[in-house]
Amino acid sequence: MTGHHTPEPTELPDPPASFDESRWPMAAAVVVAIVLTVLLPDDLRMAPRWVFPVVEGLLLLALIAGDPGRIDRRSAVLRAVSIALVGALALSAVGSTVHLVDNLIHGGKETSSAPSLLQAGGTVWACTVLAFALLYYELDSGGAAARAHHRPATPALAFPQHLNPELSPPGWRPRFIDYLYLGFTNATAFSPTDVMPLAPWAKIVMSVQALLSLLILGLVVARAVNVLA
């Protein structure tokens, strides 16, 4: 009679190391967006010159104080602050775009000079790129802190490294530079390039950004050519 053979226990794989990234690239983008907002002409603002910069600056300081250095602390409060910050940036950028388009249609003081028009249009366009890059960064897979601890099987935005894992290092996650590149290419190509939107919200947000960019670049360039002519 043979005895019952107990299989030897197998070793479990080591848990993946926590992935986190520096706060400073994201913070630098917010600071640049705040500076650009301050430089906007008064008639392209939704509120007095100081309102959005002060609100955005305080929210950024709260984020840095709550999770300094590396972004890896998961907190409902910090998540709410992050959403509020990118929401304020996006609202300011969309509002400036609406005012710019209105000035182009009805004639504003910036529209009579090609250099002033190109400067104002370029500033508004840059604000939209930064705002939407930060929006993608914060909404994709629950934000940077959530991505530091968990790599979702079905991300809202599919980067080339997701589609071709053999081209990326193990445990790869997108960083802020990847979302900034997405915001820039979507604003210049007016469509997805190498990053595919999978979630409905991603398709909607990318469509809105492409539309705003098309309005800014198309109307500003057309008006500037008309002024120069």
Image (tube, rainbow, N blue to C red):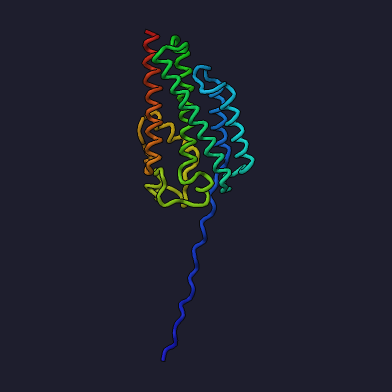
Q: Is residue 128 shown above or below 143?
A: above
Q: Nearer the viewer, residue 71 or 87?
A: 87
* Residue at the limit of the structure toward the top, as seen here: 229
Q: Tell me residue 224's x, y (percent).
A: 40, 13
Q: Residue at x 51, y 21 (%)?
A: 45
Q: In the rendered view, tell whether residue 36 sits above or below residue 157.
A: above
The front one of 10 and 48 is 48
Q: Quadrant of residue 204?
A: top left
Residue 114 visible in this rendered orientation of the protein: no
Residue 136 in percent (x, y) is at 46, 38
User: Furthest residue to the front?
Assistant: 47
Q: Quadrant of residue 202?
A: top left
* Residue drawn where x is 48% and y is 17% of the image: 119
Depth order, front residue of 50/143:
50
Whether residue 203 sits left or right of residue 74 in the image: it is left
Residue 139 visible? The answer is yes
Q: Give the residue drawn at x 49%, y 29%.
A: 91
The residue depicted at 52 percent of the width and 44 percent of the height is 144
Which residue is nearer to you in this view: 125 or 1? 125
Above or below: residue 119 compared with residue 174: above
Quick check: 138 left or right of 229? right
Q: Is residue 201 above or below residue 105?
A: below
Residue 83: % across, % down: 52, 39
Which quarter of the rendering shows the C terminus? top left
What number of labels is visible? Answer: 0
Q: Quadrant of the N terminus?
A: bottom left
Q: Residue furthest right?
A: 65
Return the x and y of residue 226 as percentages of the image width and height. 37, 10
Q: Residue furthest bottom?
A: 1
